[in-house]
Structure formats: C-alpha cells, structure tokens
Image (cartoon, helix red, strand yellow):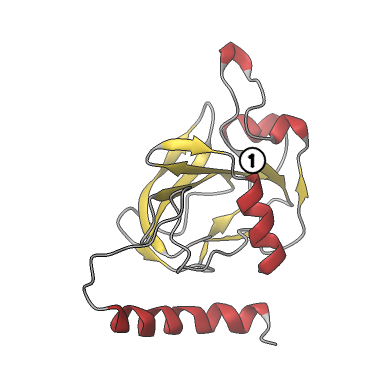
Amino acid sequence: MLSRHSRRLLLPALLALLALGAGTASARVVSSDGAMPFYEHVFPIEGSFAERGPVGEFGAPRDGGRIHEGFDLLAACGTELVSVVTGKVRRTGYDPILYGNYLEIHGQGEDRSYFFAHMLKPPLVHRGQRVWAGERVGAVGKTGNARTVGCQLHIEIHVHGVPVDPKPEVLRWERYS
C-alpha cells in the first residue's frame, strides 16, 4: 500500500493522465449533493486534530441569529493544511471579524466550493491559481473570531453557493486519506 506522501506525489500525475484521456465530452455525472465522484478528495489537516464539539458543528446557533455554516476541527497552530480537492482558487483574503485569513477553492468538475478559515497566515496560493488535492495551501491558525477560541480549521462546503453540512464529507476524507 502506498504511503500518504507517495499518494500525494502520484495523484497529480494520475489526474493529468485521466484528463488527457477525457477528451472534450460534455456529459458529466454529478451526484445529488453536487459532487463528481471522479475526483479524489483528501483530508485537509496534515497532523493530529479533534472535533470542536456541538458548538463547532453545522447549524449551531451564533450571535445575532446567525447559524454556523461550517465544521470546526481543532489542531495545533501551524499544522499544515492541504487542498481537499483539485480545482481553482476562487478567492483569498482576510476578514478581521469572522473568518480571519481565508481561502475558497472551487472543485474541478464539481458544483461545489470548499472554504477554509482562521488560517495562521494568508494562504500560500492566490486567486485564479490551480491547486491539486493534497497540495499545501497554508496552516491552521486562530485568526478572525477564532482568536478567543484557539487554533482551528473552519471548513465550509457550498453547493451552487448554498452551504451544506461538511461533517460527513470531512470525516469520510479522514477515513480514506
């Protein structure tokens, strides 16, 4: 069985070969949740982590009548973060109130986007850049409103711009990465 590191090196080459063989067919098989099963997803944290608990789950109440639109994973500040999917960086930035340093990647061949927040520093990738599943994109941090909570990754999944519960996907990626 290949190690996690070997799989990360092998994946870009395999995806490139598959893309060459895919041609320009316009038919796409998309699952009901907006995902295309062809592309591999990987777990975003390269190290030890823990779930934040009920307060960090999708739908948890927030101040001002908001609800939590993501899933929080606790990890040591500086723990490496990798892209969960091959795709294109849609946006990066800094929001001092909620998200701190953030990154959004639109999955290739999917109708889904993946959003990382509270990163230690600005992402290592830039808007418009292509990223591969497993490529390093930054580090776990506690920026934005996480500065009082501690080091964590806040991850969201959006299907056609609508947030969906990321927990089942994130835990599935963890099992298979």
Whether residue 130 is visible, yes or no, is yes
Residue lying furthest top: 64
- Tally of marks: 1
Q: Nearer the viewer, residue 130 or 161?
A: 161
At a point 53% along the width and 82% down the height, the residue shown is: 9
Q: Is residue 29 left or right of residue 164?
A: left
Residue 79 seen anywhere in this rendered image of the structure = no
Residue 17, picture quadrant: bottom left
Report x, y in % for residue 74: 73, 46
x, y percent for residue 143: 59, 38
Quadrant location, the N terminus: bottom right
- Judging depth in this view, the residue of 30 and 171 nearest the camera is 30
Residue indicated by mark 1: 71
Above or below, comparing residue 158 to residue 110 in the picture: above
Residue at point 62%, 15% (across, down) = 63
* Tag 1: amino acid: Phe
The percent coordinates of residue 157 (x first, y second) are: 51, 44
Residue occupying image coordinates x 76% and y 54%: 49
Q: Quadrant of residue 28?
A: bottom left
87 sits to left or right of 176: left
Closest to the observer, 170 or 132: 170
Residue 70's spot in the image, x, y percent? Answer: 59, 37
Label 1 crowd bin: few (<14), some (14–19), many (20+), radius 10 Å = many
Question: Where's the C terminus, which quadrant?
Answer: bottom right
- The residue at 69%/50% (across/down) is 77
Relative to residue 91, is residue 88 depicted above or below? below
The secondary structure type at the circle numbered 1 is strand
